[in-house]
Image: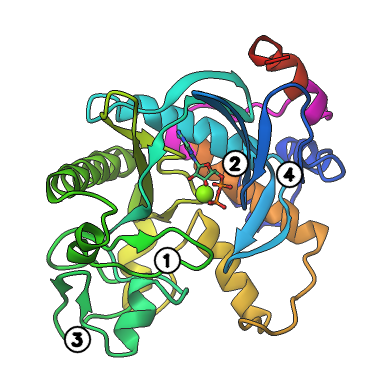
């Protein structure tokens, strides 16, 4: 698939994806499913102890919502559901049911006020990314000191590090001592959170490696259930919450000073930068060609990661399908 795309030929899959350009899920207005909260990517319908996370096709980057990418919500929801199963032995997750390609029914948790970022490489292009900070002279990251002389996209010699950020409009790095001082978690809770995050990441790296992929970094969200049990929430190891590189070309491209081949959101961030985008500046036009190209990247990641064929739905009306598949979760 990737090869034919590079050669400029159109595959059946690509044609099927194009059919969803017009009906990509920009927003939802589902009936009788509870109160709706609109996140950057998900619409969350809450009904007491239960929430329904609907992954839309919205594409955000640099904290801006840019466009919709056909079938991206399905990729996110299905990849996340697959990973929740893979890591179930490490910790419980919020998943109750996955009744639709784009929706997951979850236990509503008391969410941690920080996002747990784990990084194994010096990567990134946003203001909180390890590389941008390192290149500006920062050597201390949330209690981890990095050595001099590291190159962009190099693997961290110390192994994976935790660089938590606050959850808000704009994420900011926060040291573990600050997390405890500000009452976001007790020391004992933070110890458990960090231990679990590193275990999840280690397992994620192993599984990714077996599929020819490098899990570069990721962001976890966790919360506590009614019994006070630490539980994995939101999404896990998706191409929105993680960076993925293709393993086979990594070393050679690093040596040549080229960006790794990426199958995640970073691809879109780099594309925006190439168009000259800067924070606060004019926004480049996102054409349908770019939307399809992004969709093919997401689908490629889905197929490589899960080892399963991505099934393009027959019905282009995603909203109607959601409403049908969520019937048993209606509250009125
Ligand atoms: N089990 C859960 N309980 C409560 N909130 C959750 C749970 N899982 C995810 N969330 C929250 O639902 C929202 C998902 O929407 P999303 O578009 O990802 O939001 P954001 O704009 O914060 O990235 C996030 O605010 C996330 O923290
Ligand atoms: Mg999110």
Which circle's residue, 1 or 3, is located before the other in the chain? 3
Specify the label residue 299 is tagged with.
Answer: 2
Which circle's residue, 2 or 3, is located before the other in the chain? 3
Are the residues at dot 4 and dot 1 in contact (C-beta closer than 8 Å)? Answer: no
Q: Is mark 3 within 8 Å of ligand 2?
A: no
The mark closer to the camera, 4 or 2, is 4
Badge 1: residue crowd in 10 Å (few <14, some 14–19, many ≥20):
many
Which circle's residue, 4 or 1, is located before the other in the chain? 4
**Callout 2 secondary element:** helix
Which circle's residue, 2 or 1, is located before the other in the chain? 1
- In the picture of the structure, the residue carrying the numbered disc 3 is 149
Specify the label residue 70 is tagged with.
Answer: 4
- Mark 4–mark 3 distance (CA, rounded to whole Å): 41 Å
Q: Is residue 152 visible?
A: yes
Q: Looking at the picture, how far across and down is residue 120, in whole percent?
A: 25, 60
- In the picture of the structure, the residue carrying the numbered disc 1 is 260
Q: Quadrant of residue 268?
A: bottom right
Badge 4: residue crowd in 10 Å (few <14, some 14–19, many ≥20):
many
Q: Is residue 289 above or below residue 139?
A: above
Depth check: give the residue in front, 41 or 172.
Answer: 172
- Mark 2–mark 3 distance (CA, rounded to whole Å): 36 Å
**Callout 4 secondary element:** loop
- Mark 4–mark 1 distance (CA, rounded to whole Å): 25 Å
Are the residues at dot 4 and dot 3 in contact (C-beta closer than 8 Å)? Answer: no
Q: Is residue 235 above or below residue 324?
A: below
Quadrant of the frame with the N terminus: top right
Q: Is residue 106 above or below residue 327?
A: below
Residue drawn at (46%, 40%) of the image: 235
Residue drawn at (13%, 47%) of the image: 191
């Amino acid at each position: 698939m990737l090869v034919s795309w590079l050669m400029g030929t159109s595959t059946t899959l690509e044609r099927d994806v194009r059919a969803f350009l017009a009906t990509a899920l920009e927003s939802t207005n589902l009936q009788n499913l509870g109160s709706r909260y609109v996140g950057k990517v998900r619409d969350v319908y809450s009904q007491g102890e239960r929430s329904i996370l609907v992954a839309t096709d919205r594409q955000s980057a640099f904290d801006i919502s840019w466009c919709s990418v056909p079938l991206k919500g399905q990729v996110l929801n299905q990849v996340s559901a697959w990973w929740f199963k893979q890591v179930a032995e490490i910790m419980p997750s919020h998943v109750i049911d996955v009744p639709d390609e784009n929706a997951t029914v979850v236990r509503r948790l008391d969410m941690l006020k920080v996002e747990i970022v784990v990084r194994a490489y010096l990567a990134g292009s946003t203001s909180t990314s390890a590389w941008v900070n390192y290149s500006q002279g920062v050597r201390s990251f949330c209690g981890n000191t990095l050595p001099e002389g590291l190159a962009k996209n190099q693997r961290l010699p110390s192994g994976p590090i935790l660089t938590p950020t606050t959850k808000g409009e704009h994420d900011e790095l926060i040291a573990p001592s600050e997390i405890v001082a500000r009452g976001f978690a007790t020391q004992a809770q933070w110890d458990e959170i960090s231990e679990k995050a590193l275990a999840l990441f280690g397992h994620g790296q192993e599984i990714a490696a077996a599929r020819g992929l490098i899990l570069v970094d990721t962001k976890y969200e966790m919360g506590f259930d009614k019994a006070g049990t630490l539980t994995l929430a939101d999404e896990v190891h998706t191409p929105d919450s993680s960076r993925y590189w293709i393993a086979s070309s990594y070393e050679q491209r690093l040596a040549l000073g080229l960006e790794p081949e990426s199958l995640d959101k970073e691809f879109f961030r780099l594309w925006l930068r190439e168009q000259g985008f800067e924070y606060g500046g004019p926004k480049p036009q996102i054409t349908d060609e770019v939307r399809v190209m992004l969709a093919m990247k997401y689908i490629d990641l889905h197929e490589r990661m899960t080892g399963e064929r991505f099934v393009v739905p027959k019905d282009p009306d995603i909203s109607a399908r959601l409403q049908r598949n969520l019937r048993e979760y209606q509250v009125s």
